Image (cartoon, rainbow, N blue to C red):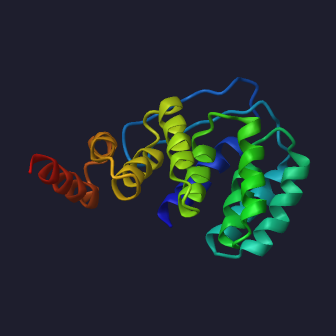
Amino acid sequence: MAIYRHCFWILCVFLLSSCTTPVKKNLAKDSEAVIHVVENRSVDASVRRDFKESLELLNAGRYEEAVTLLNEVASQTEGNSAPFINLGIAYSRLDKPTQAENNFLKALSINPDHPVANNEFALFNRKRGQFQEARALFERAVESYPEYLPARKNLGILCDLYLNDASCALDHYRIYHKANPSDEEVKIWITSLEKKMDS
């Protein structure tokens, strides 16, 4: 659940800013890295308030209410990927895969390299057993935003548990752990995979 809250916060950062510059990256080297994805859309104050409220509803598990509010936000922010990403997440939690997929695809049609959109759509595909599609999305996220840690960790998990690709898993776990050495769980996974590969 922490990853989703972290993702929602990232989405809030770029939707709430009225920017006139193209997509940029501002990456820090720790687990609380701020990923700035700037889209060329100004957003009015009432829409910003509604978006913030929708994040609170999502984090509280009130997905139906969040969907209603996010659909209103999306209708007023055409060309901004954030509401569509969160609609994808909310519909996925409501077990409405068609609506979830449509919204993730809409977000990616607006911004194909968006790290959160790729990461969340990859998680959605992994849940449906579409592992190669998930891998391609995780790889796009880490290629465009190499230090976006949730996608890095999730790609490692996919390679480790679902694709039986220990080399891929180790590569991404190590990069993730170097940036976030306090994650003891990933440290254990690395040690386990190293032992497995040495035997």
Q: Residue at the location (70% across, 52% down)?
A: 85
Residue 114 at x, y = what percent? 63, 38
The number of discs equals 0
Q: Residue at the location (76% across, 25% down)?
A: 20
Q: Residue at the location (78% across, 53% down)?
A: 102
Residue 61 at x, y = what percent? 65, 75
User: As drawn, is 162 to the left or to the right of 17?
Assistant: left
| Along the line of sight, the residue nearer the viewer: 182 or 85 | 85
| Along the line of sight, the residue nearer the viewer: 101 or 77 | 101
Residue 81 at x, y = what percent? 74, 43
User: Where 116 falls versus 53 (above or below)?
Assistant: above
Q: Quadrant of residue 54?
A: bottom right
Q: Quadrant of residue 91?
A: bottom right
Residue farthest to the top, as pictured: 21
User: Where 48 falls versus 33 (above or below)?
Assistant: below
User: As drawn, is 31 to the left or to the right of 63?
Assistant: left
Residue 129 at x, y = what percent? 54, 60
Q: Residue at the location (46% across, 49% down)?
A: 150
| Along the line of sight, the residue nearer the viewer: 105 or 22 | 105
